[in-house]
Amino acid sequence: MNRFRRFKRSLAYSALLGLGWRVALVIGFITVGGFLIISRALEDNKLEELAIFIQERAEREGAIFRTISKAHTQAAASLHQALAQADNEGPDETAFLEAFDRYFPLQPDGTRRSADFLFEGARQGVTGWISGMGAFIKNGKDLTVADKRLLMTAFETAYHVGQAQFQDLPSLYFFTPNNELLIHAPSRADRLMFYRKEAPASFDFTSQELVQITLPENNPEGEMRCTSLRPIIYDQTGTTWTTGCHTPVYLNGTHVGAFGSSILLDKLLENAIADVPLGATNMIITADGKLIAHPSLTKQGEANDRMLDIPASANTNLKAIYSAIQEHPDDDVFVTTVEATGHYVAIGRIKGPDWYFVTAYPQDLILANARENATILLYVGFVGLLLALASLLVAIRSDIVAPLRALVRHNQNMARGDFSATPPTIAKGSAGNDELGQLARSSARMARRLSEAFSTLEQRVEERTHDLAAAKTQAERANAAKSDFLANMSHEIRTPLTGIVGMLDILSGEQLPESARPYVSMARQSADMMLELVNDILDLSRIEAGKMVLKPEPTNLGGLLNRTVLSLAPLASQKDLELTLKDDTPKDLWLKIDQKALRQIMINLIGNAIKFTDSGSVIISASARAVEGGQQSVTLNVKDTGKGIPRDAQARLFDRFETVKENQITGKSTGLGLAITRELVQLMKGWVAVESEVGKGSTFVVSLRLDEADAPLDAGLDAAPGQDRDLTGLKVVAVDDNPVNRAVLKKLCESEGFEVSVLSSGEEMISRIAALQKEGAPPPDIFLMDINMPGKDGMVTLQEIRALGGWARDIPAIAFTAHAVVGVVDNLKAGGMQGYVGKPIDRKAFLAELRRCLSEGVR
């Protein structure tokens, strides 16, 4: 009695009483929820088994197609090796041509057919024994030596590889897009007589599916492709079905033909649908919706009922299954539910012919099996829960109450400041890996770490400092990567912009309706603005990355300023503004200046002044005074009568992506012009500032210290030799891989009266120049080369053209490129180019460069 009273006062009793009704409630939920969960788990397990089954079946049915692909790969490699060996050894051409004529004698109808002994069997020189071979060559008269060597080598390759793979593949053949077929098929019932004897001279298979699926335009990946299911050619009953799988062959990047194999499918299809899980149905469906194998809906051996067009049929179940296939175009294996049919459908792709192996399994069958097994498991689980309730009391007293008492004592010690004490349960080894045991060990670790924290604080501060330095380095690298990215993107944008600007120039010269001309003009203005933005981004990225290198050269400061102001005069005239240059510098003052940088600084400042001035004037003034060290202190002012800039906005005016609009700082435009101006001025060791008052205009001041220079010897010449040359009738050969750029270039040249031929690749241009030399045609006057092309770029193409010799070495070449990086001109000229024109193409710069290169020639 006393023991019971003590028990009622214990934590164990309170826990058991509090948990009792909850345990009863939990048992009810577990009973229902467990049944559902276990049913679902068993159902999922069955579906996983179904997925594994369909994956194994798809792989098994696709084995023959993997074998074909492997054989084609081996044949292509053997063909490449044999041709390379023949090129290296240089065989006797006379003996080779005699062998070719013996193998493929020319027929009276102009074709070449394989000799009978090649099928019947005979030993042939070093080739060895040959049998089971046939061939049909439609154009037998005009074959080149290279054509004959390819066909002979492919013939021998088809025989040797076909023999090695004969047990798995009844046929291996090689064909070209020019109606040339070489085939190894010793077991064919027709003994290849169709190709050897019966095929008419007009026999043309180039439009057939087997050729079309191997052409580069239809198969750019160069993968093995299989034809649609069809009757075999020599079976006139239409009851024997086959498919052909073909792999393109490329030599030196050029498509020359394909290796192919045909296989009979009757046994494969019959076996596929026969081996089926209990209660399920197997079928095979093509990617274009043809049912080609089904235990009841297709009839093997009967041509009219062999294939069922699912989209055109009235079978709603098949349509639902085919719709599920179309919803998973990228999945090789998947299991889904087709509610319309009441089935789980497992689908696996058979690669090669692009078929789908389908197993339809009734939902009711799987659910019934899952529920039956789940019910048994629930009975077992219910009994286990009752036993767990009976042992709950023992577990509470031994595993909860006792460890809690030990932890209370340990926490009391910690409250007294004793961080080194160990919980008694751990000291005795009675604490396990449960939550209470982990809590006890965590308490001990916490005490130790609190003691260690004070002694390691200084070390952690040092580690944090090191981490901050590493983070700073990483941030700097990220900034450099960003700059490189902007430079690359500027080039990528510049390339299509070439086509836009060129096409707009072409349109502006056409006979357009008057209503359309303003739109063309606005489009050209927008393109110019985009080009200006791209240039700004590129300049900014180059400055950030430290790749902007100034190239000072002797320059007459007054002349440079005058040319710059004159180029902006039309812009000021459009707004009726007075644009004035007050040049107080000596007329004979020559300084070392990077003309491009200083011109961009002035264009940015004057352009902004014109943009934000509605009436009045823009005045540019320049002055210079001599200072020590052989330098001149140059001051440039750009003063306008515009709206002015608020004082609080002036401090941020030179920041990136900040512009002033309606007297407020806004980020609605790029805001790069003044930022680049400041960067360029600082790069030239100078400074730029602004003085402005709202309503009274603005004055931008640039101060530079520039080295004095001597006037160049040709400073008084008006133009370079040859700049007045008449270019009418100029013969031009150009190459560009971009079709839009080709159209622009062709139109530009034709508008100047040139005779122009624009080609699409480096290989095509090399072939054209070689052909012109061979024909003895007059040489062109100049080459225009796109630098960035796939395959052979402009530099490689020019080197190979020069290697042709003759007049090809003496024709000047001008490079076109959208790259706008430092050193590009030097690199191009070092690589053999005589001139350079950037993209988008400026007509005046293009014509000037033409005249210069024609005058100087190849050096």
Image: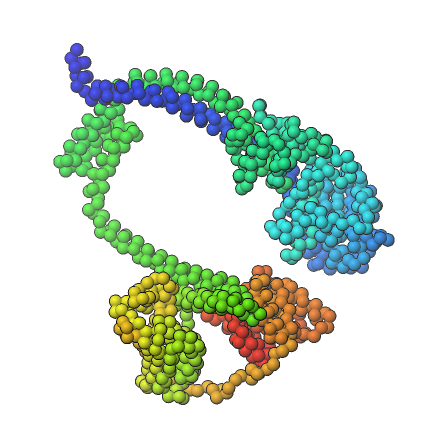
Q: Do we see residue 486 in this rendering?
A: yes
Locate residue 757 relative to residue 633 in the image: left or right. right
**Is 140 on the left-hand or right-hand side of 261?**
right
| The furthest residue to the left | 416
Image coords of residue 39 (percent x, y): 44, 24
Above or below for 620 versus 643: below
Residue toward you, 289 or 217 = 289
- Residue 424 place in picture, x, y as percent: 21, 29
Name the residue rendered at 50%, 21% in the picture: 369
* Residue 720, horizontal then vertical, whole percent: 53, 83
The percent position of residue 308, horizontal first and vertical second, equals 65, 34
- In depth, the one of 271 and 313 nearer the eye is 313
Residue at x-position 63% and y-position 40%: 353
Question: What residue appears at the point 51 percent right and 33 percent down from the top-left corner?
Answer: 336
Image quadrant where residue 609 sits: bottom left
Q: Quadrant of the N terminus?
A: top left
Above or below residue 815? Residue 199 is above
